[in-house]
Amino acid sequence: MHKDLQEILVTEEQIRAKVKEIAARINEDYRDKELVLMITLKGSMIFATDLMRYLDGDILIDCMQVSSYGASSVSSGNIQIKKDCSIDVYGKNVLIIEDIIDSGHTLQVLRSMLKKRGANVEIAAFLSKPARREVEVPVKYLGAEIPDEFVVGYGLDYAEHYRNLPYIGILKREVYEK
């Protein structure tokens, strides 16, 4: 375990099992249908990469970078599109791939934007913090609900660090409350 972590919340083995479970459900739901994976950068990259290895069928991949965080570790509530998608999503089945849902604002804006562009939109998120939810968004595929703790690893970061950890852990408060 990394020295900056309080504890490991989701192990590598648990992650792998949950990704396979989510992929099996997606394969069943989108059998014989084209699917666009809309990966939210940067945090969802690892989850998306692991997930697509288990997906069958016709898969297209695109990325968007959407942010509601400023310089701090707290969501500003101001949603910014830093990188838009390049695929025309009109009439397509789009699955937004998200690492974690906190307030719900970012996913609400992203989902609405893609629906206005004519896409059929669903959401797959690896983690959810229900205690932080301000806006409910319909998540079709969810890995796990977690407590309201600052988590890192498996793509999740603090100040761009810890994304490469192969598990998800709770960051010690003294690291981010400096």
Image (spheres, grey):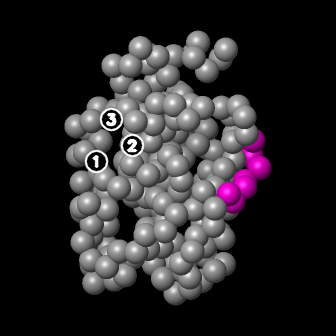
- Check if mark 1's residue and mark 2's residue have beta carbons within 8 Å: yes
As drawn, is 60 to the left or to the right of 77?
A: left
* Residue 162 in the image, given as x and y percentages of width and height: 46, 30
Residue 29 falls within the magenta-colored stretch? no
Q: Amino acid at mark 1?
A: Lys
Relative depth, front residue between 146 and 8: 8
Residue labelled with disc 2: 144
123 vs 86, left or right, is left
The x and y percentages for residue 129 are 52, 39
Q: Position of residue 75 (x, y in %)?
A: 69, 40
Q: Is residue 150 left or right of residue 144?
A: right
State how far apart marks 1 and 3 are (Cα).
14 Å
At horizontal 24% and vertical 54% (from top left) the residue drawn is 20
Q: Are marks 1 and 3 in contact (CB under 8 Å)?
A: no
Q: Amino acid at mark 2?
A: Ala
Q: What's the distance in space between the residues labelled 3 and 2, CA to CA?
A: 16 Å
Q: Is residue 139 in view? A: no
User: Label 3, on which residue?
Assistant: 166
Q: Amino acid at mark 3?
A: Pro
Q: Residues within 10 Å of mark 1 (few under 14, many from 20)?
A: some
Residue that appears at 39% across and 56% down:
48
Label 1 belongs to which residue? Answer: 18
What segment carries the magenta color?
76-82
Locate the C terminus by quadrant: top right
